[in-house]
Image (tube, rainbow, N blue to C red):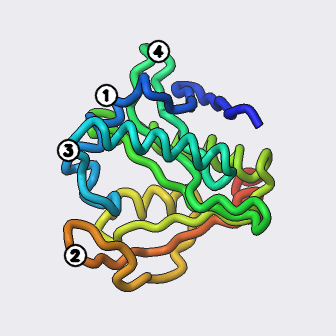
């Protein structure tokens, strides 16, 4: 399958390549981005390069899809969004995303999430999209709930970051719930 390029009114969701190493490193080296990411912040551009290799491998092996989020107007790479733990047979995946703080609170994340949800439910025929979010990441929890995700519970000590174990919420959105929401709009 060719890598699916997606678009919204203001964004292009593109395949991430090594031409994006510096932009990705800039984002993933910021403390405020990585605070709730589930891994330590990047300290070397080579870490971004290895992550891009992993994104590409996961796509080839049908275990995930990660898009770069690019502004249509100026082609600025502002973050990534994607499906982790993709299981086509079981019709499920987890969504994950991050955006450079300069672009927070502009609706870009919800715009990208909605496009990925449409692709996931309509083109990949997934039934469940999950999300694992730190309880302290109130902005992300609220964004997902606003989109229609339902909080299922707390995973205790689920992620180890900065030599500490952290609890996470697990949220999900099922295809029939998403379809119902879309009919109401």
- The residue that appears at 56% across and 29% down in the rendered structure is 14
**In the figure, 38 relative to 42: above or below?**
below
- The residue that appears at 65% across and 50% down in the rendered structure is 117
User: Which is in the foreground here, disc 4 or disc 2?
Assistant: 2
Query: Crowding near pointer 1: few (<14 within 10 Å), some, many (20+)?
Result: some
Q: Secondary structure at mark 2?
A: strand
Cα–Cα gap, marks 3 and 1: 12 Å
User: Which is in the foreground here, disc 4 or disc 3?
Assistant: 3
Q: Secondary structure at mark 3?
A: loop
Query: Crowding near pointer 2: few (<14 within 10 Å), some, many (20+)?
Result: few
Cα–Cα gap, marks 4 and 3: 30 Å
Cα–Cα gap, marks 2 and 3: 19 Å
Nearer the N terminus, badge 4 or badge 3? 3
Residue wearing tag 1: 22
Nearer the N terminus, badge 2 or badge 3? 3
Give the farthest residue toward the top.
74
Q: Between residue 32 and residue 10, name the one nearer to us.
A: 32
Residue wearing tag 2: 164
| Residue 166 x/y as whole percent | 30, 76
Q: Is residue 42 left or right of residue 58?
A: left
Nearer the N terminus, badge 2 or badge 1? 1
Cα–Cα gap, marks 4 and 1: 20 Å
Query: Crowding near pointer 3: few (<14 within 10 Å), some, many (20+)?
Result: few
Q: Is residue 113 left or right of residue 2?
A: left
| Residue 8 x/y as whole percent | 60, 30
Residue wearing tag 4: 73
Q: Secondary structure at mark 4?
A: loop
Q: Pointers 4 and 1 in contact (CB under 8 A)?
A: no
Residue wearing tag 3: 43
Cα–Cα gap, marks 2 and 1: 28 Å
Instruction: Give the quadrant of residue 9.
Output: top right
Q: Between residue 151 and residue 42, name the one nearer to us.
A: 42
């Amino acid at each position: 399958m060719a890598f699916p390029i997606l678009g919204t009114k203001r964004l292009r969701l593109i395949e991430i390549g090594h031409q994006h190493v510096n932009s990705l490193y800039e984002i993933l080296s910021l403390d405020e981005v990585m605070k709730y990411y589930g891994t330590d912040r990047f300290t070397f551009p080579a870490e971004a390069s290895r992550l891009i290799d992993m994104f590409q491998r996961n796509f080839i092996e049908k275990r995930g899809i990660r898009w770069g989020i690019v502004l249509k107007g100026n082609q600025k790479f502002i973050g990534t969004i994607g499906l982790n733990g993709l299981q086509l047979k079981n019709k499920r995946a987890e969504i994950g995303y991050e955006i450079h703080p300069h672009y927070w609170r502009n609706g870009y994340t919800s715009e990208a999430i909605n496009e990925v949800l449409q692709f996931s439910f309509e083109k990949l025929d997934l039934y469940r999209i999950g999300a694992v979010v730190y309880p302290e990441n109130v902005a992300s929890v609220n964004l997902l709930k606003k989109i229609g995700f339902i909080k299922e519970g707390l995973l205790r000590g689920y992620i180890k970051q900065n030599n500490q174990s952290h609890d996470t919420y697990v949220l999900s959105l099922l295809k029939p719930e998403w379809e119902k929401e879309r009919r109401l709009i």
